[in-house]
Image (spheres, helix red, strand yellow):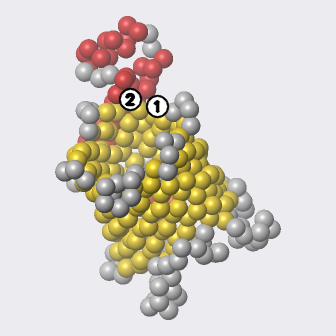
Amino acid sequence: MKRYTSTLLILLMTSPAALAASVSATSTSVKKLDNSAGLSLDNVGISLSNTFATDIKTPNAANKSMVNTTALTISYKLDSTTKLTLSTIYDKDLENDREGLIRDPKIGLSKSFGKLNKYLSAAASTSAKIPLSKSSRITTSLQTGLSLAGSLTYDASEHILRDLSITYAPAAIVNFHKYRVTTAGSSNTQYTLSNTLALNYGLTDIVSLSASGTYYRNFDYTGHTKDFFGIEQTASFVLPQNFSLSVGHATGGSALAVNGRESNVSLFDRNLSSYFLNIGFSY
């Protein structure tokens, strides 16, 4: 498994890098790239987004949270249904010590299977983490994390509501650590299983509304489990020149109350909820 991951990493890291470097090259070198390597700059995609999120606590609250998150994804289209991707995320804390953290980059492969019938369409993706963050290298000793996800989308326009779609997306993650415990002495997460249900409604040609809920379970190396949830409601707007804008509310946390029996899942929680503004660009 480790050898396969390393080989895939090399393939995904070198090809997008060569394509990105050739953007500023002359037309002759671009033509040479297309002809000799069978690659085309037309198949390269770039997605950049910036999200500002804050909770509703007062500005002088001791545990006030404000974070700015920047995400970059570079993709290469292998064919009309398959893409290679390289993505990374940078978080900047706007409170407390204002520390900036880079999450582990991910390399991935996604494929759309198109319509299975008149109402259903399917897709699948897989990815691998590159443990570059301080947390992964030092705290958790992560070597890599492999994920596999699928999605099944139902077009409910005819049976429920026009321009409404419903997506179910299960996912599984397996992590590989050098040590089973963190430097703090807690057990690392070995597996994660999740299920997501999302509704998307096209209000107009430029405005869409969505709501999603995710329930996931972490398994550590000792066999213990922890359940978590995440809920989000979003209004998205299509802007000119490949830009997009979205605003929304999100909440999430432990799925069980402190007593370990009662549910802690709620649509809104003053201590867990946050509001966000996202501006994105895709090419």
> How busy is the neighbourhood of tag 2: few (under 14 within 10 Å), some, or many (20 plus)?
some
Q: At which x and y percent is residue 77? A: 31, 33
208 relative to 12 in the view: left or right:
right
**Circles 1 and 2 in contact, beta carbons < 8 Å:** no
> Relative to the observer, which residue lies in front, 121 or 118?
118
Give the labeled residue for mark 1. Answer: 283
Q: Residue reaching furthest left?
A: 117
Q: At which x and y percent is residue 230? A: 48, 68
Between marks 1 and 2 in the image, the one whose residue lies nearer the viewer = 1
| CA distance for labels 1 and 2 | 8 Å
For marks 1 and 2 on the same chain, the one whose residue lies earlier in the sequence: 2
Helix, strand or loop status at disc 1: loop
Q: Residue reaching furthest top?
A: 28
> Relative to the observer, which residue lies in front, 10 or 35?
35
The structure residue drawn at horizontal position 47% and vertical position 62%, both measured from the top left corner, is: 211
Whether residue 112 appears in this view of the structure is: yes
Give the labeled residue for mark 2. Answer: 44
Helix, strand or loop status at disc 2: strand
Question: Residue 49 occupies which quadrant of the picture?
Answer: top right
Q: At which x and y percent is residue 58? A: 77, 69
The structure residue drawn at horizontal position 38% and vertical position 65%, both measured from the top left corner, is: 197
Q: Could you tell me the amino acid type at mark 2?
A: Val
210 relative to 44 in the view: left or right:
right
Q: Residue reaching furthest right?
A: 60
Q: Could you tell me the amino acid type at mark 1?
A: Tyr
Q: In which quarter of the image is the N terminus?
A: bottom left
- Residue 245 sits above or below residue 55 on the image: above
Whether residue 144 appears in this view of the structure is: no
